[in-house]
Image (spheres, grey):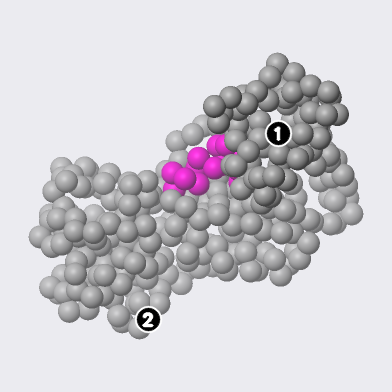
Amino acid sequence: MADRRLQVFTTVARLLSFTKAAETLYMTQPAVTFQIRQLEEHFNTRLFDRTHNRITLTEVGQRVKEYADKIIILYKEMDNEVRTLTGDVQGPLIVGASTTIGEYFIPGVVGAYQSAFRDVKVRLHVANTNGIIHMVENNQIDIGIVEGPVNNKNLVTDVIWDDELVVVCSVDHPLTRQQCVSAADLLDYPFIGREEGSGTREVMENYLVSQDLNSAQLNIIMEFGSPESIKNVVAAGLGISILSIATMEKELALKSLCAISLEKPVRRPFSIVYQRQKFRLRAMDEFLEFAQAHCAARQKLLQLT
């Protein structure tokens, strides 16, 4: 029911990019341009100034955006209220997850959620923690689930998981003879790290600082953006790493890798984040409950014994 032109317009106005708006809306760029042109023809004025591959809102465009934002919020409130009264839950719902969570938890959550609410269309974005927080802040996704602390006071943060970071090594590595590993032990072996912006990397770096060390002292020989890539390199005997215990379920069952606790255990929260001022659709509330229940169940299965 909400005017599609207004939805396209507010997305372009927020991102100030036709290309990014098209990606966010899953539309082609010509389709986005057509919707904006129609709206400009309706008002018989330009809403954007286009100069040197940049766009900015005109004075009229800024005023249209103020009203369009209000219209879209009111429409969502009306739609959600009616669906709450009728018991109907529909989407779309756009969810983002940091790499570890996106690879190891979200598929199960989304599968269970879609089975219960078939009329909700869930779209999933996976990136590192910084990328997901940025998308929540810019209203590109409805919900983010990320690793590590979130410091933005404009975001609601609900902890759903108490994760542990462990040292990962091959089954014949000398560290397997130890009950636990100290921070100083990490300096003695080639290290496989996560990429810049990773929540795992940030927590690891903070841990080293707490032990009067720093990441520059590690013998980092490779960096990857995926736990799977790291595990493959570690299994080949090329080095050790620090990963979430949540990523190790299959390898521990098959005994293809070893996971050893750090001498001073390193724990971090997995958190659901969303904008404090964002209107929450019923589909969003239901997803939050699903994610929390799923993580609570998985938490019991993935503890080190």
| Cβ atoms under marks 1 and 2 closer than 8 Å | no
Look at the image and give the residue range highlighted in magenta: 129-142
Q: Residue at x 71, y 70 (%)?
A: 115
- Which residue is at the far top? 59
Query: Label 1 is placed on what type of residue?
Result: Thr
* Left or right, 163 with reference to 81: left
- Which residue is at the far bottom? 254
- In the image, 209 versus 225, the foreground residue is 225
Q: Residue at x 54, y 42 (%)?
A: 135
Instruction: Decide: few, some or many residues near mark 2? Use Cα within 10 Å; few <14, some 14-19, many ≥20.
Output: few
Name the front one of labels 1 and 2.
1
Q: Position of residue 63 (x, y in %)?
A: 74, 20
- Which residue is at the far left? 188
- In the image, 231 versus 25, the foreground residue is 25
The part of the image, by quadrant, that contains residue 46 is: top right
* Quadrant assignment for the N terminus: top right
Q: Position of residue 290 (x, y in %)?
A: 64, 60
The relative height of residue 22 versus residue 239 in the rendered view (above or below) is above
* Quadrant assignment for the C terminus: bottom left
Image mark for residue 10: 1
On the question of residue 123 being in view, the answer is: yes
Q: Residue at x 37, y 57 (%)?
A: 225
On the question of residue 303 being in view, the answer is: no
The relative height of residue 290 versus residue 203 in the rendered view (above or below) is below
What residue is disc 2 on? 253
